[in-house]
Image (tube, rainbow, N blue to C red):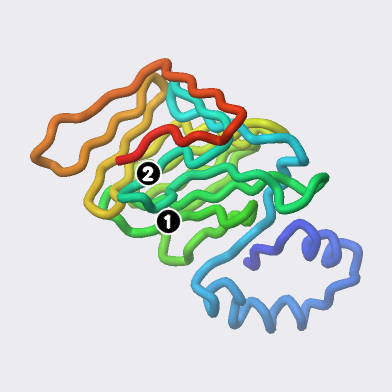
Amino acid sequence: MTLLCMQCNQKRKRGLLSRQTVALHNAGPKCLQQGFAREWLDYGTHPVSVAIGSCSSTWGEVITVDNESILAVRPPPEIGMPWNLSAKFADDQGRPTLAIEDNYLVVYTSTWDVRTRGPRIVVRSRKGKHSLIIKMEPPGLIRIEKLDMSWAGREIKVDKRRLRFRRSSNEDWATLQNVHVASEWGMGFIGI
């Protein structure tokens, strides 16, 4: 069985893509050669808000770890262009799983399992262990429903009710619930 993108799947269905071409690419998939697969996300020309558990933030550096941007929404380079969404996600061991690079969704081939179910992207780091659930709600919202990640020694956890983080396993968890940051200047939300 070969997984095709929507465009190639339609070409194959209409007879515009040969079985030989599919077999050739199946033998050496591009994403395995690169170490990732990627797809463009369309959020239109309006600012994107980010909901993290019960918290939310408008554009800006939403989450930073040691001044490194982990989740950000930035203005477009030109008027009429889409706003840029960027993010870095990892599992609870700190292994990168998924990224968003200026609206391009990047899934690393080393990730145990990634599935899309309607508007949701579900990342599992192992059987039964969800490390990330994102719900895409274009044109104006990305919702992080679940997150269990480690980045640069920091732990970040999100569920429907709260955002929790700590700098080391020796510290207590800091918890945010129902915090909403709105800014016309793109201020940051949380630095860990």
Question: Which SS class for mark 1?
Answer: strand
Whole-percent x, y for residue 69 in the image: 43, 50
43 on left or right of 32 = right
Crowding at dot 1, Cα within 10 Å, few <14 / some 14-19 / many 20+, comes out as many
Residue nearer the viewer, 112 or 55: 55
Q: Nearer the viewer, residue 119 or 147?
A: 147
Location of residue 139 in the rendering, given as x and y in whole percent from the top left corner: 72, 34
Marker disc for residue 97: 1
Mark 2 and mark 1 in contact? Answer it, CB < 8 Å.
Answer: yes
**Residue 157 drawn at (x, y percent):** 32, 35
Q: Is residue 18 left or right of residue 118?
A: right
Q: Quarter of the image containing the C terminus?
A: top left
Residue 64 % position (x, y): 39, 45
Q: Residue 152 falls in which quadrant of the image?
A: bottom left
Q: Which residue is farthest top?
A: 178
Q: Mark 2 belongs to which amino acid?
A: Ser
Residue under label 2, please give it. Answer: 131
Disc 2 is placed on an element classified as: strand
- Taking the spot 67% from the left edge, 79% from the top edge, the residue there is 25
**What amino acid is found at the position of numbered circle 1 in the picture?**
Thr
Q: CA distance from mark 2 to mark 1?
A: 9 Å
